[in-house]
Amino acid sequence: MLIRRGPDVRSSEITDERLYLKRREFLQAIGLATAGVAAGAIDLGAQAGRRPPRLGPVVKGPYGTAEPMTPYETVTTYNNFYEFATDKESPARLAAAFRTRPWKVKVDGECAHPADYDLDDLVRPQALQERVYRMRCVEAWSMVIPWVGIPLGDLVKRFEPTSRARFVEFTTLMDPRQMPGERQPVLDWPYVEGLRLDEATHPLTILAVGLYGVELPGQNGAPLRLVVPWKYGFKGIKSIVRIRFVARQPVSAWAREDSREYGFYANVNPHVDHPRWSQATERRFGEPSRRKTLMFNGYGDQVAGMYAGMDLRKNF
Ligand code: MTE
């Protein structure tokens, strides 16, 4: 978990994760981990549940990776979604009945077409692409996830940002009745994130509406979440209700919480450690040993140019 303090926190966290992975490895070994019904029957500690409806048609998008994908059951039962809970297993259960229709997204600020858009007008099914991306959480675990979504750049173009717009700010739904975590002062709700305009329009950046060919489950940020694969996972804001074009750098919820620990850029960088732990290596789900973390999460060829001349230790 990101915010817990104290020297004992990390070791217990890691132990939990190891135990969890061991259990998964055991289940995989005996062939149960991908069989939702059987897994549910022996209680994985989260809802195995039925898969959400299929999305379609979905075309293969660019920038895929051939690395083995993290199983659907893992991607949808080990989540960070503090609006529901601060542990990894509860969001799947607590978001099971999360209402994602009707869903409005307010687009405002420095753009020519501010309005409250209905999600289904914003994201047209015929434009859906699959993007298999490596994802690296700031907590040093990683997954490979086949997202389904649209390039955020296409949307940004439609809204026509003005010449004053330099950043894009995103906000998560505030609805404590549905999201029990928002009744706790864990973060200064609502969750806010931001990107520089060039990052937002970079072809790797997508708004996702699904994964593994199905609609996003609630715990993964239904019905609309940001995916920026060269940045730490916390930039991937979930359940977005507002997209605002602004002239000044937004203050994200995590930076507001602790700006020494969570920078605005949050580019994956093995050479800049988090103040409380190393970022040099990561634990990829399903792999027995840790692997080295790659600069920009391995997407440097595509994105390094955006940060040329910047001190990435200062702008972490
Ligand atoms: N968005 C919101 N609104 N609330 C959150 O708690 N957690 C972030 C990010 N987006 C979070 C969020 C973190 S820390 C990570 S690692 C990813 O979501 C996890 O996404 P996943 O559960 O789909 O793997």
Image (cartoon, grey):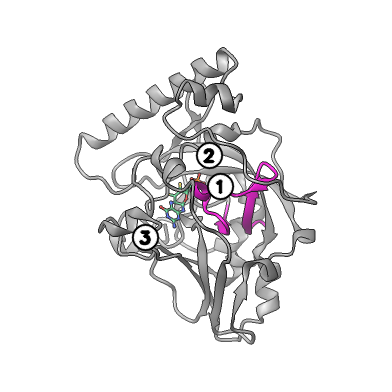
Circle 3: element type: loop
Residue shown at 52% from the left, 48% from the top = 220
> Could you say which quadrant of the image residue 71 lies in?
top right
Q: Which residue is mark 3?
A: 177
Neighbours of disc 1 within 10 Å: few (<14), some (14-19), many (20+): many
Quadrant that contains the N terminus: top left
Residue 45, image x, y percentages: 41, 29
> Residue 12 vs residue 232: left or right?
left
User: Does label 2 or label 3 sit earlier along the sequence?
Assistant: 2
> Residue 62 vs residue 270: left or right?
right
Q: Nearer the viewer, mark 2 or mark 3?
A: 3
The residue closer to the viewer here, 132 or 43, is 43
Q: Which residue is mark 2?
A: 76
How far apart are the two marked residues, 1 and 3, measured between alpha carbons?
Answer: 18 Å
Q: Amino acid at mark 3?
A: Arg
User: Does label 1 or label 3 sit earlier along the sequence?
Assistant: 3
Is the residue 297 above or below the residue 109 in the image?
above
